[in-house]
Amino acid sequence: MARKSSIVKDERRRRLVKKYEGKRARLKAIIYDRNASDEERFNAVMKLAELPRNGAKIRLRNRCKITGRPRGNYRKFAMSRISFRELASKGMIPGVTKSSW
């Protein structure tokens, strides 16, 4: 199981990403717009730099919803390979069965 502090930190980042998502998108649109003036684009860059770093989507980490494990995650199920295998073996994930041959 992951440390509680890591899980809480990731949750805090997810809230910040959701909060600043629209503002970051508008500023980036101005920055990448070649028709905007240089001064306008520079001001957009400066405003973007003032936003919190943890508000950037790139700083998020995929974690298991059950254990918080940061590696070996299946995106479709939002859980680690270990938790997935345990629950699949018990038959607790609908539509998933453990293969045997």
Image (cartoon, rainbow, N blue to C red):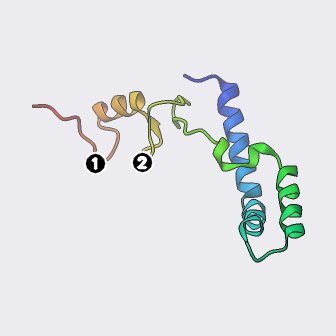
What secondary structure is marked by label 1?
Answer: loop
Image coordinates for residue 56, horizontal then vertical, percent = 71, 49
- Asked whether 21 or 89 is in front, the reply is 21
Sooner in the amino-acid sequence: mark 1 or mark 2? 2
Tell me if residue 92 comes above or below residue 56 in the rendering. above
Using a 10 Å C-alpha cutoff, classify the residue at mark 1 as few (fewer than 14 neighbours), some (14 to 19) or many (20 or more).
few
Q: Position of residue 85 (x, y in %)?
A: 34, 30
Task: Determine which residue is flagged by label 1.
Answer: 95
Give how far across and how far down residue 72 sits, in percent.
44, 31
Q: Determine which of the numbered discs, if any, sits on residue 76 in the image.
A: 2
| Quadrant housing the C terminus | top left
Query: Which mark lies nearer to you, 1 or 2?
Result: 2
- Report whether 57 appears left or right of 78: right
Q: How many residues crowd around disc 2 within 10 Å: few (fewer than 14), some, or many (20 or more)?
A: few
Q: In the rendered structure, which amino acid carries the disc numbered 2?
A: Lys
Query: Which residue is at a point 78% across and 63% down the rendered structure image?
Result: 23
| The N terminus, quarter of image | top right
Question: Residue, x 76% and y 77% (percent of image)?
Answer: 35
Name which residue lies at 70% across and 33% down.
Answer: 8
